[in-house]
């Protein structure tokens, strides 16, 4: 089950300590700065690069790098909100993420739904589907289903091994919602929590699940459970296709820009601490 009293910190999934622990379980060596910011070690075209994922660099960020002896390493930054990085060049434009505010009351959240989305939810609630909620397991078939689906649809998600590692090191931060039809699963939704926020991590449905609006039902159930446990925001992921974006937007989610991706390298920088 989710932690009944999640920590108040608001941070992206890739800045969570459980994510760092999952990386280590997969054999990687992330760097934790004195402020708690998480940096990833990557090798691009043979060059060892540090990455700051989904976080705004604080005013003393470069001081912290110096304290860790990392001030001369090439650096890629991807702020999760609009931000200009001094001394860096932008290498990718900002993209938009759908964020859903879970702080309104349940009646207010339902009233906020687009009428078509709400109608589909009502049909699902009155239909034969039943929702199971349980912790995710490290060997759940959903991981293989997502791998096959991502290849077919050509989108990028975490490797199955990383998701498996995350649910292993932080079982209280993962929850699987499954729509059952006469005892058989027809749709899944995996939610990961991180501080006061949560992320829609994996979704999968069958044709039967789609025809019965299983994802409307699963997402509504997830929204309710998360809100009851004090989660304030649900990250529904980036803009993708018109159909998927419409589904997200009709929940009441707001599309918000990130800060783009920046590259900074000062090979002759002096340590400033």
Image (tube, rainbow, N blue to C red):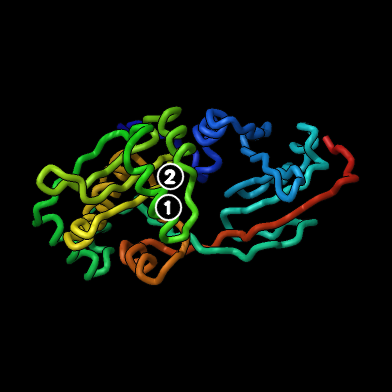
Q: Residue at x 76, y 46 (%)?
A: 47
Q: Is 105 placed above or below 64 here?
A: below
Q: Residue at x 69, y 62 (%)?
A: 91
In contact (CB < 8 Å): disc 1 and disc 2: yes
Q: Is 152 placed above or below 181 here?
A: below
Label whose residue precedes the other's in the sequence (1 or 2): 2
Callout 1 secondary element? strand
Of tags 1 and 2, which is closer to the observer? 1
Q: For residue 223, say whether it is visible.
A: yes
Asked whether, in this view, residue 19 is left or right of residue 109, the answer is right
Q: Which residue is mark 1?
A: 235
Quadrant including the C terminus: top right
Q: Position of residue 24 (x, y in %)?
A: 57, 29
Specify few, some or many for label 1: CA neighbours under 10 Å numbering under 14, 14-19, or 20 or more: many
Disc sitting over residue 70 in the figure: none
Q: Residue at x 24, y 48 (%)?
A: 221
Q: Which residue is mark 2?
A: 197
Q: Residue at x 30, y 32 (%)?
A: 1
């Amino acid at each position: 089950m989710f932690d009944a009293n999640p920590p108040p910190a608001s941070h992206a999934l890739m800045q969570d300590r459980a994510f760092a622990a999952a990386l280590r379980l997969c054999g990687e060596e992330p760097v934790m700065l004195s402020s708690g910011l998480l940096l990833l070690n990557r090798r691009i075209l043979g060059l060892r690069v540090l990455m700051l994922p989904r976080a705004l660099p604080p005013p003393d960020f470069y001081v912290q790098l110096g304290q860790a002896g990392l001030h001369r390493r090439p650096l890629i930054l991807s702020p999760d909100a609009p931000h200009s990085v001094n001394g860096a060049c932008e290498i990718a434009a900002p993209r938009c993420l759908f964020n859903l505010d879970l702080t309104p009351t349940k009646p207010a959240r339902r009233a906020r739904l687009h009428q078509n989305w709400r109608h589909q939810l009502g049909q699902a609630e009155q239909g034969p589907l039943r929702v199971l909620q349980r912790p995710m397991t490290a060997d759940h078939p959903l991981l293989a289903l997502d791998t096959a689906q991502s290849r077919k649809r050509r989108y990028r998600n975490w490797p199955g091994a990383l998701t498996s590692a995350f649910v292993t090191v932080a079982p209280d931060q993962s929850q699987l919602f499954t729509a059952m039809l006469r005892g058989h699963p027809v749709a899944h939704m995996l939610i990961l929590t991180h501080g006061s926020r949560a992320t829609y991590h994996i979704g999968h449905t069958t044709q039967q699940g789609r025809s019965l609006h299983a994802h409307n039902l699963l997402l509504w159930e997830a929204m309710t459970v998360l809100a009851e446990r004090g989660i304030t925001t649900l990250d529904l992921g980036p803009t993708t296709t018109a159909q998927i974006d419409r589904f997200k937007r009709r929940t009441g989610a707001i599309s918000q820009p990130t800060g783009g991706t920046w590259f900074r390298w000062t090979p002759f920088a002096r340590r400033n601490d």
